């Protein structure tokens, strides 16, 4: 699609030259000689960028036109062209809302670059505006926000598995929202009227975790002055969420396996079995198959829990979900802090989209909370974001092609790219998997398929 440019200049030869040269660069150019003609054109057609000279003969000048556009068409970027002698007026134009100004004689490459930036910034501004308008209307899956393809696949699987009593293993990087998905499964299930209880295997020592899971009898240990029902039994008729499953101590794994198999448990210090009817939903950011191979996690327990596997995509793979979530957090924290904030500037939104978000949604939430607290304006600007986000630069690994005209199957492209990534990280499979967006198991499988080493699960 050609971007439409309106050029306003009282010099006919300049208009013709710019129309011809920009036309060759793929722009659709309309020209006019004065502000009256410009207003008429703007009333009849849509344009992506307005380029105006400051000096327009005897009528209103380009500064007046800039002010008029900003007041009447704030969605239209304005680029001002000026001779050196009118530099102060050009600066005034920037103050009144012009996006850029260029000196005469106009350098075509600089003009094309300025046009491209204006078009890109305007497109991002429109996306930010749309998200501000629609964030309250965005279809939400319980408390989860996002409409990317990856999340739609998650929603579809949640809908299906919620209707069963099958155990679910939710995997994904830290901060991707695994507990929210567990809540969604519970709320959409026939157990929704029952309790939803949760515990993290990494949050407490082994002895305390055992008594929390299975309960204990009075006198079982020094501080056991009364008996206590374990969380697995407390969640009877509902769902139990076991977070950080990969941190479950190996000594407790056979006891949990037996409880899940028999649907009974024995409290610490007890002699009688207690039956329970609880659905187990577990989550981990650890590669459990690797832990099984290394003898750190029981294989039979892994398969008992991993009846249905649900993989959450990292935030960096969710596209404009990043902006939708960020806008939601702005509104949430602005209300909490009693501040009037509308969202992000286009430049700040671009930084959010560029950043890799290793901490995923949790990191984004903290970033927005900080920005809302520190910003002195009604929009969050790049300087309000943490320095790591301001300075972040992508570092792509380029695939070298020996022959520019070489055409190869996609499998060969993938094989070469994986090989190049492995070489760039000195063979570290963990690092390569992160760069490629694979889990380690997928990388091993592809390495074996493409003959890139033996693909064994070692560094």
Image (spheres, rainbow, N blue to C red):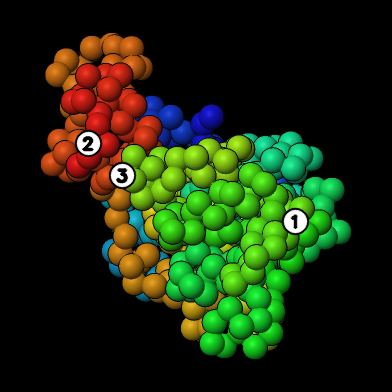
As rendered, which of 177 and 196 lies closer to the eye?
Answer: 196
Mark 2, secondary structure of its residue: helix
* Position above or below: 415 against 239: above
Percent coordinates x, y for residue 161 in the rendering: 71, 39
Q: Determine the image quadrant of residue 128.
A: bottom right
Q: Residues within 10 Å of mark 1 (few under 14, many from 20)?
A: some
Picture disc at residue 421: 2
- Seen at 58% across and 78% down, the residue is 220
User: Which quadrant: the C terminus?
Assistant: top left
* Viewer-side label of 2, 3: 3
Mark 1, secondary structure of its residue: strand
As rendered, which of 329 and 52 lies closer to the eye?
Answer: 329
Picture disc at residue 298: none
- Seen at 22% across and 19% down, the residue is 451
Picture disc at residue 294: 3
- Seen at 31% across and 44% down, the residue is 294
**Disc 1: which residue:** 275
Percent coordinates x, y for residue 436 in the rendering: 33, 38
Q: Mark 2 or 3 closer to N-term?
A: 3
Q: Residues within 10 Å of mark 3 (few under 14, many from 20)?
A: few
Q: Is residue 43 visible?
A: yes
Q: Residues within 10 Å of mark 2 (few under 14, many from 20)?
A: many
In screen coordinates, is 423 left or right of 77?
left
Q: Mark 1 or 3 closer to N-term?
A: 1
Percent coordinates x, y for residue 388 in the rendering: 33, 67
Mark 3, secondary structure of its residue: loop
| Residue contact at pointers 1 and 3, CB within 8 angstroms | no
């Amino acid at each position: 699609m050609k971007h439409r440019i309106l050029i306003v200049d009282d010099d006919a030869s300049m208009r013709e030259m710019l129309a011809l040269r920009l036309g060759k660069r793929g722009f659709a150019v309309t020209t006019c000689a004065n502000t009256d003609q410009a207003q008429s054109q703007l009333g009849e057609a849509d344009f992506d960028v307005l380029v105006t000279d400051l000096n327009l003969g005897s009528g209103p000048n380009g500064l007046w036109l800039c002010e008029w556009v900003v007041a009447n068409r704030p969605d239209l970027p304005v680029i001002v062209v000026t001779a050196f002698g009118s530099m102060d007026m050009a600066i005034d134009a920037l103050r009144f809302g012009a996006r850029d100004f260029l000196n005469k004689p106009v350098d075509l490459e600089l003009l094309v670059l300025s046009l491209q930036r204006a078009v890109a910034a305007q497109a991002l501004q429109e996306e930010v505006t749309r998200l501000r308008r629609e964030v309250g209307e965005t279809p939400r899956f319980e408390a989860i926000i996002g409409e990317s393809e990856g999340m739609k696949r998650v929603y579809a699987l949640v809908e299906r598995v919620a209707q069963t009593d099958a155990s679910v293993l939710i995997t994904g990087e830290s901060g991707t929202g695994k507990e929210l998905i567990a809540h969604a499964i519970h709320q959409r299930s026939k157990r929704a009227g029952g309790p939803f209880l949760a515990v993290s295997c990494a949050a407490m020592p082994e002895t305390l975790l055992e008594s929390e899971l299975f309960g204990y009898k009075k006198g079982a240990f020094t501080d056991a002055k009364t008996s206590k029902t374990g969380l697995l039994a407390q969640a009877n008729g509902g769902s139990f969420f076991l977070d950080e499953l990969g941190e479950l101590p190996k000594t407790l794994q056979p006891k949990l396996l037996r409880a899940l198999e028999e649907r009974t448990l024995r409290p610490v210090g007890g002699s009688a079995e207690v039956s329970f009817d609880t659905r187990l939903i577990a989550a981990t950011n650890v590669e459990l198959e690797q832990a099984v191979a290394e003898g750190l996690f029981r294989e039979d327990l892994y398969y008992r829990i991993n009846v249905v596997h649900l993989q959450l995509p990292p935030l960096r793979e969710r596209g404009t979900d990043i902006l939708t979530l960020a806008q939601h957090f702005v509104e949430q924290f602005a209300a909490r802090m009693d501040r009037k904030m509308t969202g992000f500037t286009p430049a700040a939104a671009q930084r959010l989209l560029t950043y890799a978000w290793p901490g995923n949604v949790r990191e984004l939430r903290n970033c927005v909370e900080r920005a809302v607290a520190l910003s002195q304006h009604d929009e969050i600007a790049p300087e309000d974001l943490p320095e790591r986000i301001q300075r972040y630069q992508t570092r792509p690994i380029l695939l070298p092609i020996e022959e520019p005209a070489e055409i190869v199957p996609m499998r060969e492209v993938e094989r070469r790219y994986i090989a190049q990534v492995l070489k760039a990280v000195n063979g570290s499979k963990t690092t390569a998997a992160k760069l490629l967006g694979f889990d380690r198991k997928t990388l091993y499988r592809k390495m074996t398929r493409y003959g890139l080493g033996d693909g064994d699960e070692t560094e």
